[in-house]
């Protein structure tokens, strides 16, 4: 064999390997095992189940524009990389998903690849939806095909260079996408497994409760450890740390209530979580809400973050006195002198992890803007907290948040007027 | 069913409104403690306790607070208040602090909140006398009580009631509102930022008002003596000069 032939052979082999790699990373074709059962009849029951599952997946929250038709898309979704415009998923043949097959829908849910083979941006939570079973995907498909088609063209994304190049998603997918349906853990109960399936799959809880890094990905090793929600400026607490929203010492009933009712004896939902409860979780069956609670309660507790040192907890006595005075004047009526509240109407502040967790963002925002728990089937007349931003200056806001973080044996740390001022500049949302 | 839904992106998307006013309404905590702008309620299981989220801006009984912007809502027709709450929830009326607070509330609860504040009758405080330019004052009197036929502006009293306490079910009372609030709302209507149900009579009127007219009306209204009877007038007792969608009777 001549040298030239050898070189040519090596080049050919390398090209074949490269093509194979690209083919493997671009899941453009549909593997045979994904084919649906053609005998599956679309029954009213299947559509109904699909609607229930679509709600568990909260499709409506993103795929419906503020003043638009249901599922017709068009809602701008600001991301750190630019604005994405959510697509039309009504069954319109031209502008929606009317021509999609159940196979193509499943491939999209399972691998994040659109009907025409383009890679979806991970604002679509396919890294979670990949856990959804084929049968559930088919039910959601049947439901979406049953809603009224709306003719509305998709708005092109407005992403900054280089994020407008979808080829970059190959890298993202290699790092953060693990394709695969949920596999039950035989050592756990059926209830735990059902909860895990909902939390990890359709619920896509990790989208907020696992920190998003600079690449817009969340790493599995940090699952449910909490993080700031990009562009919303609320802090999604850790579900695994007892210092934050770790649920290890909660009653299952309180966790289920928080998810399904929006308020419980331990805490109440506001902001982005109130939206999730309103649009999605309130429609869960009692059994499913409880299953999610059982799974969340059993998440391994991590001591990733040591409690603050006594040095870090030191508070200037004049600040503490201002905080105490503001509390007695403005807060005690609803939350009580001892911070016990009137749960579930007015949540307790003493012993409430969401008050003492490392990030004071949510507490400061609540003082500035107030907030109402979502109106739900089980709590149709929610109680709420008024905004105090127009009554208290930055020093007073910082002092009262500091006070509730350290009073009644709470183990939080002081906050500064600058932190209050930063959040005052944001619109309530 | 297309249920319009409020979300945070909507606020970011277009609201021309400022964030909460930054000037503080009270000089000290002691003064704040004596005000009607802090939560207080009797029975926990009551609509009063459930609407504590409203009090720091609108007062305990909906009388408004003296910050110069937050309006009196007490005694306005329930239909009007309900329409506003729905519009704030759905984002068709934009004011970020309100959009945020009522974003996830069902219709029947918004109706209940509206009816609660419509029933309140806190006393109207006499307005402090204010020096107003006599020309402006005369223009205000004309616009409020007689209108301007030449420019096609009906009198405020023609729809908002002879006592300016509003008309059932959808036309708000104008007594007890601060001039800054009135000018701001008329301006928002004029520039197309605020809308009412079609036919939007207020939009037609606002586009006919000059900036001076708005100031004149606002100044006049802020100095009007509180009526002895603050109740809104009954629905469509008088023939209204313009058709108003807000007055349409709903099933």
Image (spheres, rainbow, N blue to C red):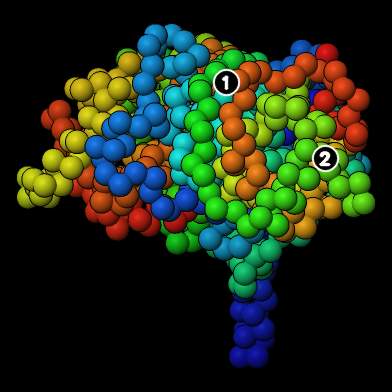
Q: Is residue A193 left or right of residue A32?
A: left
Q: CA distance from mark 1 to mark 2?
A: 30 Å
* Residue A32 sits in quarter: top right
Asked if residue A192 is positioned above or below residue A179 in the image, the reply reads above
In the picture provided, is A141 more to the left or to the right than A349? right
Label 1 resides on the chain identified as B
- Foreground residue among B61 and A105: B61
Left or right: residue B187 versus residue B114 is: right
Label 2 residue SS: loop
User: Which one is nearer the viewer's eye here, A196 or A317?
Assistant: A317
Q: Is residue A167 left or right of residue A275?
A: right
Mark 2 highlights which residue?
B146
Residue B103 image offset from top left, x and y in percent: 59, 33
Chain letter belonging to callout 2: B
Q: Quadrant of the N terminus of chain A?
A: bottom right
Q: Is residue B59 visible?
A: yes
Q: Position of residue A245 (x, y in %)?
A: 33, 32
User: In terms of depth relative to the viewer, which is nearer, A12 or B7?
Assistant: B7
Residue at 20% over, 40% down: A323
Q: Residue B3: image x %, image y %?
A: 74, 29
Secondary-structure class at tag 1: helix
**Which of the marked residues, 1 or 2, is nearer the chain's N terminus?**
1
Residue found 58% across the figure and 49% down from its top = B180
Q: Which mark is residue B117?
A: 1
Q: Up-down: is A296 above or below B45?
A: below
Q: Front-most of B125 and A228?
A: B125
């Amino acid at each position: 064999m001549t040298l030239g032939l050898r070189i040519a052979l090596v080049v050919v082999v390398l090209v074949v390997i490269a093509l194979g790699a690209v083919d493997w990373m671009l899941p453009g074709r549909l593997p045979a095992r994904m084919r649906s059962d053609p005998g599956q009849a679309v029954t009213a029951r299947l559509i109904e189940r699909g609607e229930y599952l679509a709600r568990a997946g909260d499709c409506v929250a993103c795929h419906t524009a503020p003043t638009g038709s249901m599922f017709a898309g068009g809602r701008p979704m600001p991301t750190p990389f630019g604005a994405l415009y959510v697509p039309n998923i009504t069954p319109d043949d031209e502008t929606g998903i009317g021509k999609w097959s159940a196979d193509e829908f499943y491939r999209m849910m399972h691998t994040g690849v659109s009907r025409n083979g383009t890679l979806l941006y991970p604002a679509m939570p396919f890294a979670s939806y990949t856990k959804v079973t084929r049968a559930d995907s088919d039910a959601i498909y049947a439901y979406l095909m049953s809603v009224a088609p709306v003719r509305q063209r998709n708005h092109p994304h407005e992403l900054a260079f280089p994020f407008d190049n979808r080829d970059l998603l190959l890298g993202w997918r290699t790092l953060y996408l693990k394709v695969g349906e949920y596999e039950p853990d035989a050592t756990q109960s059926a209830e735990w497994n059902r909860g895990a399936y909902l939390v990890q799959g359709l619920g896509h809880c990790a989208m907020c409760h696992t920190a998003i890094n600079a690449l817009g990905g969340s790493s599995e090793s940090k699952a449910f450890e909490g993080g700031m929600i990009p562009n919303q400026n609320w802090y999604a607490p850790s579900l695994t740390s007892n210092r934050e929203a770790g649920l290890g010492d909660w009653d299952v009933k309180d966790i289920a209530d928080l998810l399904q009712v929006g308020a419980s004896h331990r805490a109440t939902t506001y902001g982005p979580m109130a939206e999730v409860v309103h649009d999605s979780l309130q429609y869960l069956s009692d059994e499913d809400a409880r299953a999610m609670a059982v799974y969340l309660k059993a998440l391994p507790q991590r001591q990733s973050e040591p409690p603050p040192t006594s040095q870090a907890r030191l508070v200037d006595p004049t600040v503490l006195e201002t905080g105490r005075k503001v509390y007695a004047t403005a807060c005690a009526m609803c939350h009580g002198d001892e911070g016990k509240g009137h749960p579930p109407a007015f949540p307790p502040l003493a012993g409430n992890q969401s008050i003492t967790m490392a990030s004071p963002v949510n507490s400061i925002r609540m003082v500035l803007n107030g907030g109402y728990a979502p109106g739900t089937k089980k709590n149709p007349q929610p109680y709420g907290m008024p905004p105090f931003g127009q009554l208290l200056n930055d020093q007073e806001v910082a002092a009262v948040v500091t006070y509730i973080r350290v009073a009644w044996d709470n183990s939080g740390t002081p906050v500064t007027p600058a932190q209050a001022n930063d959040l005052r500049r944001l619109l309530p949302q | 069913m297309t249920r319009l839904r409020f979300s945070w992106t909507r606020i970011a998307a277009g609201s021309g409104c400022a964030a909460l006013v930054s000037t503080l309404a009270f000089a000290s905590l002691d003064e704040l403690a004596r005000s009607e702008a802090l939560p207080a309620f009797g029975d926990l299981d009551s609509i009063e306790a459930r609407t504590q989220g409203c009090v720091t801006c609108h007062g305990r009984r909906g009388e408004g607070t003296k910050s110069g912007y937050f309006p009196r809502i007490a005694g306005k027709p329930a239909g009007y208040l309900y329409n506003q709450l729905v519009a704030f929830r759905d984002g068709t009326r934009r004011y970020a602090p309100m959009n945020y607070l009522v974003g996830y509330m069902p219709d029947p609860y918004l109706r209940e909140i509206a009816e609660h504040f419509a029933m309140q009758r806190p006393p109207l405080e006499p307005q402090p006398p204010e020096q107003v330019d006599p020309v402006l004052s005369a223009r205000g009197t004309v616009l409020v009580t007689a209108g301007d036929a030449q420019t096609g502006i009906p009198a405020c009293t023609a729809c908002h009631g002879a006592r300016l306490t509003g008309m059932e079910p959808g036309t708000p009372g104008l007594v007890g509102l601060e001039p800054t609030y009135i000018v701001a709302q008329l301006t928002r209507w004029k520039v197309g930022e605020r809308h009412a149900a079609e036919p939007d009579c207020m939009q037609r009127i606002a586009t006919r008002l000059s900036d001076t007219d708005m100031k004149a009306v606002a100044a006049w209204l802020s100095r009007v003596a509180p009526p002895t009877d603050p109740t809104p007038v009954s629905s469509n007792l008088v023939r209204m000069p313009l058709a108003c969608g807000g007055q349409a009777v709903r099933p």
